[in-house]
Image (cartoon, grey):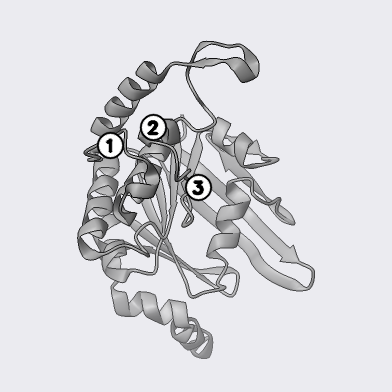
Amino acid sequence: MSDIVLQTRGLTKHYGGVHALVDADFVLRRGEHVAIMGDNGAGKSTFVRQITGVERPTAGSIWFDGREVQFNGPLEAREAGIECVFQNLALCDDLDVPSNLFLGREKVLFNLGPFSILDRKGMRAATEAALQRTAVKIPNLANTIRNMSGGQRQCVAIARAATFASKLIIMDEPTAALGVQETAQVENIIRHLKAQGEPLILVSHNMRQVFDLVDRIVVFRRGRIVANLRKEETDGQDVVAYITGAKTQALEDAA
């Protein structure tokens, strides 16, 4: 059995004359945590949209869990075992924690279509187990999302992803809008996922966070992957040089 969870070969996305992603070759192995870095417009989000089925690539192929896939939408990617935590979280403000965790995947006692009876007790028990498994601490599960802090909301979104992601979790700037204490809580959850052997892709601008949490750093610039670096073999200055283009320019000049 291959240890490769996700692989893209020549992945390319054009929006008219704009080449947002060009020939992206990417590999993620089981249990590995990889950071995707790059300036705004470098192609990071475009890459994530292709592998999660939000968009269809212009060219190239995606291999997931040993087979080539062509997701027709995020639901197909989710059913295949990919969960993504986007910056907008996709939570319902007026629902409590179990209802958000099982949003779209509700447990039912009796399936009567629009008149189905929800298994609220079962969802609460499963939520408690999920939070314990992911080391997420939410004091009151009956609290609505609207009444939670930004950090708690992010933790609910991460817990949902970790609960249903059977094969891969992707996090897009999970701490961008959080304070120091809330950021630390989210980072502890990511470490916990690492200890459990869950493969993860982290899109982040936070250099300190990246070096604290991942095994490898992939740098995008102008739609291309320009660096694939082992964390222990590089440093922040080196990564910044790739992000800004100083490193690739120096290599081109030397050639």
* Mark closer to the chain start, 3 or 2: 3
State whether residue 215 is above or below residue 143.
Answer: below
Q: Which residue is mark 2?
A: 163
Residue 149 seen in render: yes
Find out whether the residues at labels 2 and 1 contact each other: C-beta distance under 8 Å: yes
Element class at badge 2: helix
Mark 2 or mark 1: name the one nearer the start of the chain. Answer: 1
Kind of residue indicated by mark 1: Thr
Q: Is residue 142 above or below residue 246?
A: above
Q: Is residue 172 left or right of residue 125?
A: right
Vertical side of 138 occupied by 49: above or below = below
Which residue type carries mark 2? Answer: Thr
Q: Which residue is mark 1?
A: 134
Along the line of sight, the residue nearer the viewer: 29 or 144: 144
Tell me the residue at 22%/64% (across/down): 180
Mark 2, other Cα within 10 Å: few <14 / some 14–19 / many ≥20: many
Label 3 CA crowd tier, 10 Å (few <14, some 14–19, many 20+): few
Q: Earlier in the sequence, mark 1 or mark 3?
A: 3
Q: Position of residue 54 (x, y in %)?
A: 64, 49
Q: Position of residue 24 (x, y in %)?
A: 59, 60
Q: Residue 107, how many percent across, how many down? A: 47, 19
Q: Judge left or right: residue 190 versus residue 83.
A: left
Q: What is the secondary structure assignment of the residue under circle 3?
A: loop
Which residue is identified by label 3? 90
